[in-house]
Amino acid sequence: MGKSVLVLNGPNLNLLGQREPQVYGDLTLADIETRCITKARELDLELEFLQSNHEGKLIDAIHQSAGKHEGIILNAGAYTHTSVALHDALRGVGLPCIEVHISNTFARETFRHHSYISPVALGVICGFGVTSYLLALQAMTEHLKQ
Ligand code: CA2
């Protein structure tokens, strides 16, 4: 059986495909999950998906991933730019985490340029839409082989 990875999505990502297609594309979160499942099959990875609009639930999911998953792919949404608590949770659990974003946060408002996740992430992939997630799955696979 392949290694297990948690794909965690934060606030408002449940709205994908419904509004702001010029920024986030027209795929829904369910479409992104389907694309990830196809990619994971190629890479022999097991995936669990979770989306929450609540910071504490994201923190609980990070804590519970210890002993259950080998890595985390995280799009923390706007909590990326605000949450010391998510930073601490990732640091506490110590699992490899890849930060992803659909949009290129550096080409947007300056308040999106800072991330509390990046210092505790293995790496960051942003600006490629659904491909950000697929690239993260690939990078996580390579990392877990080492
Ligand atoms: O580009 C990304 O993936 C973001 O993490 C998305 C967040 C944003 O706050 C980050 O700065 C970058 C927003 C989540 C999606 O929000 C929507 C709002 C309205 C309609 C559709 C999505």
Image (cartoon, rainbow, N blue to C red):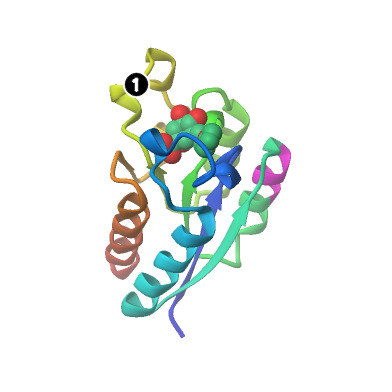
Toward which corner of the image does residue 39 lie, by quadrant?
bottom left
Within 10 Å of disc 1 (Cα), the crowding (few <14, some 14-19, many 20+) is: few
Residue 120 seen in the current view: no
Q: Residue at x 71, y 38 (%)?
A: 54
Label 1 sits on a secondary structure element that is loop
Q: Is residue 145 left or right of residue 74?
A: left
Residue type, mark 1 in image: Arg
Q: Residue at x 66, y 43 (%)?
A: 59
Query: In this view, which residue lies farthest toward the top?
Result: 110
Quick check: is 59 in the magenta stretch? yes
Does the image show residue 124? yes
Q: Circle 1 is placed at which residue position?
A: 108
Residue extending furthest toward the bottom = 1
Which residues fall within the magenta stretch?
56-60
Q: Position of residue 64 (x, y in %)?
A: 67, 57
The x, y position of residue 79, in whole percent, is 56, 30
Determine whether 47 is above or below 133 in the image. below
Q: Is the magenta stretch mostly helix, strand or loop?
A: helix
Image side of residue 83 versus residue 40, left or right: right
Spot occupied by residue 15 in the image (x, y as percentages of width and height):
58, 43
Comparing 109 with 44, the one in front is: 109
Mark 1 Cβ and ligand 1 under 8 Å apart: yes
